[in-house]
Amino acid sequence: MQVTMTVNGTEYTREIEGRMLLVHFLRDVLGLTGTHWGCDTSNCGVCVVWLDGEPVKSCTVLAAMAGGHEVRTVEGLANGAELDPIQEGFRQCHGLQCGFCTPGMLMTCRALLDKNPDPTEGEIREAISGQICRCTGYSSIIRSVRWAAVHEASKEEATAQ
Amino acid sequence: MQVPAPFEYERATSVDQAIGLLERLGSSARLVAGGHSLLPMMKLRLANFEYLIDINDLHDELGYIRLSDDEVRIGAMTRHRELLESDVLAGVFPIFRDAERVIADPVVRNRGTLGGSLCQADPSEDLSAVCTTLDASCVIRGPGGAERVVTMEEFHVGPYETAVADNEILTEIRIPRKSFRVGSAYAKVERRAGDWAVVSAGAAVWLDDAKRIVDARVGLAAVGPNTTGIPEISAALRGHEPGEELYRLAGAIAARSCDPVTDTRGSADYKRHLADELTRRTLRTAVDRARS
């Protein structure tokens, strides 16, 4: 079957099998390997991407289901060489070690900050509760999100002035 | 790599068109909404279908929470996140928000739906216990727009089996509102965040002006072949003033009425203990909420 979807602002049309999962479409068909592929059972969250602005686990969404919709992956975060504040936060605060969970964490945390620009530690923990990190113990991820929240707030203040 | 066996993908554009597809394709087809139960089962070959009919485009038609004086109607495509975030729903039946906080995780809740959860008919599934607790009924639509309404007991035929026929679709859940003060609550014990319940319990209590119990219902999940309503608890509570003695009695009835099995989540004895304790806790919270 044929599927057409927009990924990070670019429209793609490809011939696929109905059973193809979105994570494999992104990685193997489009070559966007930033999105990782982990547990295959919607438990680990490394495959999180946005579907029409909402984070979803792309191992449990058919590529066909995304047809006609908008997908955003980790490749769509940075603006050229300029990192998104959430990426910069992870860099500044050691939000990653091995990096396997990072793309999914970044997409979920970006969505959190868009909805709630000043999340508490508890709200951050709740937001990433469906994602597993085996390196950081989560504390540095939480610091990273707070870093991004604080820097985005001060940036907005500066722009307003 | 886990992927489902090959199937043909179809996309429904309206409820009636979906029913038309189901009529044509019969038992070789299955509807898929959020897909977060069905796709994992298909990956494991626990479920195989020749056709999957994607009904996500029906969200506009079947995604709603409507409140009237005598009932709440919720569309089958209403997603977990919408149930969690609805202040209207939490205002009337806070049991939904209690339950949604502990169903899967926020990312899964962006996709999963009320109808999908009920149609999955997993004995551990939380929204089935919520709907059982609230004495909900299920609206099922078939060919020619014919609708029938069944109780939760009739809806769940057995584990993973519902009253929905091959050419039908669950469209709506209706929850009656009674003209009394109502309180409701849900509690779940799970091994880790987002897991299936070891045991969970829901309670709803209706009080008259004298603060006596007019009606009370308890629904349990993960302790039998289906989510279980316990009529004996309702009978024992009606007409009484709520209090610890009564909660203890209800807990004891819950523990001996359910039918848990020993598995990796715990022993049958432990689950009976939880059924007792969670029944008491949720009744206590439900009464507090009804009084406030």
Image: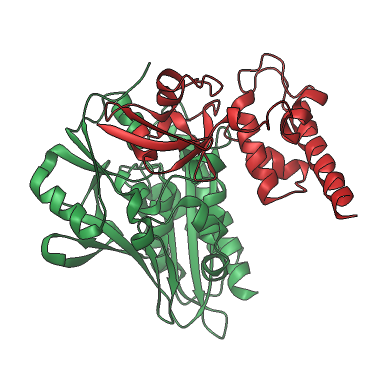
Q: Could you tell whether B173 is left or right of B198 in the image?
A: left
| Residue at the spot 63% in from the left edge and 43% down from the top edge | A111
Relative to B289, residue A68 above or below? above
**Is B200 rendered above or below residue B183?**
above
**Which chain is in green here?**
B
**Quadrant of the frame with the C terminus of chain A:** bottom right
Name the residue rendered at 34%, 52% in the picture.
B57
Q: Locate residue A77: give its quadrant.
A: top right
Quadrant of image for the N terminus of chain A: top left
Q: Is residue B27 visible?
A: yes
Closer to us: A109 or B106? A109
Residue B40 placed where, x, y %? 36, 30
Residue at point 26%, 54% (across, down):
B13
Residue under the image location 24 percent in, 58 percent down: B15
Q: Nearer the viewer, residue B58 or B235?
A: B58
Q: Residue furthest bottom?
A: B209
The answer to whether one can see residue B279 in this image is no
What colour scheme was applied to this rendering of the protein? by chain
Note whether B210 is above or below A48 in the view shown.
below
Using the image as rendered, state which of residue B26 and residue B235 is in the foreground. Answer: B26
Q: Position of residue A118 (x, y in %)?
A: 78, 48
Position of A8 with respect to B25 (left or right) is: right
Residue B144 in percent (x, y) is at 11, 65
Number of numbered discs visible in the structure rendering = 0
Taking depth in this image into account, of B276 and B202 the one nearest to the observer is B202
Judging from the image, what is the letter of the chain drawn in red?
A
